[in-house]
Image: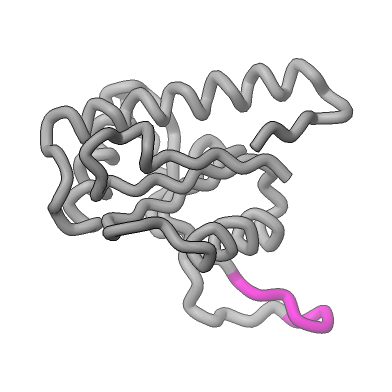
């Protein structure tokens, strides 16, 4: 269900103007994330940041799907294994939210796997449980 609210250098080899669009979209989402972190600070549950970020994306008029189901395709069979993307933003960007002491390799692997499975080239891994948010942001392009 779409929520349409009114309100590592990797280069793209083709579609250079798409890179600009992705950067702009990533920057808008990061701006919303910074606002949530500025108001709330670190130390809350992931679900709290998720709802507050939904409100910020709403105010910015950015279309997104929250907790979007992600099936596994195994040997030409679609399987519902219960995977969910935290955020699918404008059908072009996957955002995974965390509120953990430290981002780990498994968090990066999760995002990269979701990106491959969904056919989405750009992803953001955001950890709200940091004092300075820029230390909790990782952008991936495959």
Quarter of image, res 57: top left
Q: Check if residue 139 falls in the magenta segment.
A: no
Q: Position of residue 114 (x, y in %)?
A: 60, 60
Q: Quadrant of the C terminus?
A: top right
Residue 105 left/right relative to 135: right
Q: Name the residue located 37 percent from the left edge and 38 percent from the top edge.
A: 135
Q: Nearer the viewer, residue 34 or 4?
A: 34
Q: Is residue 58 visible?
A: no
User: How has the structure been colored for display?
Assistant: one colour
**Residue 103 x, y percent position in the rendering:** 41, 57
Question: Residue 65: in sight, yes or no?
Answer: yes
**Drawn side of residue 122 relative to residue 130, left or right:** right
Residues 14 and 82: in front is 14
Closest to the observer: 53 or 141? 141
Relative to 20, does residue 75 appear above or below in the rendering?
below
User: Which region is colored magenta?
Assistant: 71-77
Coordinates of residue 23 in the picture (x, y in percent): 59, 23
For image coordinates 24% across by 49% down, the residue present is: 129
Compared to 21, does 132 lie above or below?
A: below
């Amino acid at each position: 269900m779409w929520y349409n609210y009114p309100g590592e250098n990797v280069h793209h080899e083709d579609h250079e103007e798409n890179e600009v669009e992705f950067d702009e979209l990533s920057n808008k989402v990061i701006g919303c994330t910074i606002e949530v972190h500025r108001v709330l600070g670190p130390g809350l549950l992931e679900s709290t940041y998720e709802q507050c970020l939904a409100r910020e994306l709403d105010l910015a008029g950015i279309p997104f799907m929250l907790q979007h189901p992600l099936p596994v395709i195994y040997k030409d069979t679609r399987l519902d294994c219960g995977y969910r993307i935290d955020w699918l933003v404008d059908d072009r960007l996957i955002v995974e939210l965390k509120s953990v002491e430290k981002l780990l390799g498994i968090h990066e692997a999760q995002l990269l796997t979701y990106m491959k499975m969904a056919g989405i080239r750009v992803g953001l891994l955001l950890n709200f449980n940091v004092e300075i948010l820029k230390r909790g942001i990782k952008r991936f392009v495959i």
